[in-house]
Image: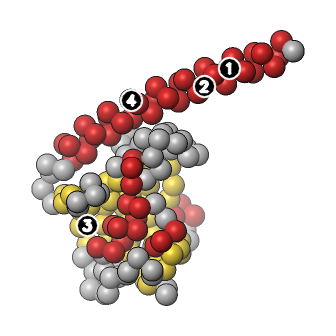
Amino acid sequence: AIFRQLNVALSEVESKKAETEALDNLELGAAFLEENGKRDGVKTTESGLQYEVVTEGTGVSPTAESSVSVNYEGTLINGEVFDSSYESGEPVSFPLNGVIPGWTEGLQLMTVGSTYMFYVPSNLGYGARSTGPIPGNSVLIFKVELLEITE
């Protein structure tokens, strides 16, 4: 019984720690986006998504119903890489209506052959919940290369 009480106490501490971290991330993310939005070349959409054109392609743009193939790298604002198709060496394919809102919106701004940087506020990402290596309320930075529309 003592172990169970200990586990409950530990999970309460973990939960409080995650809540505190999530609140800190909200503040850090807001400050990051405010500064980032002032940089030359960074555009902010009505939803709050920020993007920057690295390379402009010449192909067509996907719609919200499209399926696409991309290469990407995702980092937190501290520079920590949490996911990368470059590391696996394989592009990723998915329907645009099945990913985080920041990607659904951002990819529709792109043309095939483009590479963009997305700066995704947490409300257009994973929100307050922690997801794998991504703490709650994190701003996500993605380098995304739109390879093709795979309808």
Taking the image as shown, residue 88 lies to the left or right of residue 126, namely right
Residue type marked 3: Val
Decide: few, some or many residues near mark 1? Use Cα within 10 Å; few <14, some 14-19, many ≥20: few
Mark 4 vs mark 3: give the one in front.
Answer: 4
Q: CA distance from mark 1 to mark 4?
A: 21 Å
Instruction: Please tell me in which quadrant of the rendered image residue 73 appears.
Output: bottom left
Q: Earlier in the sequence, mark 1 or mark 3?
A: 1
Q: Which residue is mark 1?
A: 10
Label 1's element?
A: helix
Taking the image as shown, residue 32 lies to the left or right of residue 39, namely right
Mark 3 vs mark 2: give the one in front.
Answer: 2
Q: Residue at x 50, y 29 (%)?
A: 19
Q: Do the CB atoms of the residues marked 1 and 3 lie less than 8 Å apart?
A: no
Label 3's element?
A: strand
User: Along the line of sight, which residue is nearer the eye, 60 or 19?
Assistant: 19
What is the number of the mark on residue 54?
3
Residue type marked 4: Asp
Is residue 114 visible to the viewer in this orientation of the structure? no
What is the number of the mark on residue 101?
none
What is the number of the mark on residue 24?
4
Instruction: Please tell me in which quadrant of the rendered image residue 101 appears.
Output: bottom left
